[in-house]
Image (cartoon, helix red, strand yellow):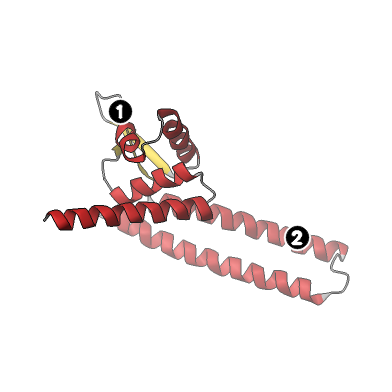
Amino acid sequence: MKITMDRQQKEKEELIELFGSHFHRYHNLPPLAGTILAILIVNKRLDGMTFNEILDITKASKSSVSTNLNLLLKAERIVYHTKCGERKKYFKPSSLVDRMSNHIKIVEAEIKLIKKLKNYDVTYNTTDGVDKYQKASDAYLLYMEQFLNVIYTATEQLAKIEQEK
């Protein structure tokens, strides 16, 4: 049993490292924020994790952990709750539906921008007769709209799963 637990712990630490690097590299989070988010996701505790538990795992300073937790809260990547009669906060990742909703906001905003740019190009003939710019923006707009539909579908499916007891 000891070998299995050591192996499980090692794989857990590797997952946290991989997720942390992913969030740092592709979601523009500071390294510690990426690591904290990874810890919360990999640990999957329904109850959440306390500040001290996160502090123990990260081995970072209290101020650094606090700053990065606040950043994650502000970015709506994590949430917290308290228990009646306790002052402790219990942190956990935002629900998948909430995280997908953030993707929807980003894609919808980009679609609006693309449409505004296309309208600007047509109104002021900024492409100077070069058809490839219109074709490129049409293709990109189509991609973004199709991507948005995929996100909508996935979000609906996740919402159903999250509502199950």
Residue 73, percent from left and from top: 45, 38
Q: Is residue 165 visible?
A: no
Judged from the image, the secondary structure of the residue bearing numbered disc 1 is loop
Query: Which corner quadrant holds the N terminus?
Result: bottom left
Residue at x 40% of width, y 60% of height = 156
Residue at x 69% of width, y 61% of height = 114
Cα–Cα span, label 2 and label 1: 49 Å
Residue 72, percent from left and from top: 46, 40
Judged from the image, the secondary structure of the residue bearing numbered disc 2 is helix
Tell whether 155 sits left or right of 13: right
Residue 164, percent from left and from top: 26, 55
N-terminal of the pair, mark 2 or mark 1, is 1
Task: Please count the marks in the image.
Answer: 2
Q: Quadrant of residue 18?
A: bottom left
Kindly identify which residue carries mark 1.
Answer: 88
Residue 66: mark: none
Q: Amino acid at mark 1?
A: Lys
Q: Quadrant of residue 108?
A: bottom right
Residue at x 23% of width, y 56% of height = 8
Kindly identify which residue carries mark 2.
Answer: 117
Which dot, 2 or 1, sits closer to the camera? 1
Q: Is residue 122 visible?
A: yes
Q: Amino acid at mark 2?
A: Leu
Name the foreground residue: 87 vs 25: 25
Label 2 crowding class (10 Å Cα cut-off): few <14, some 14-19, many 20+? some
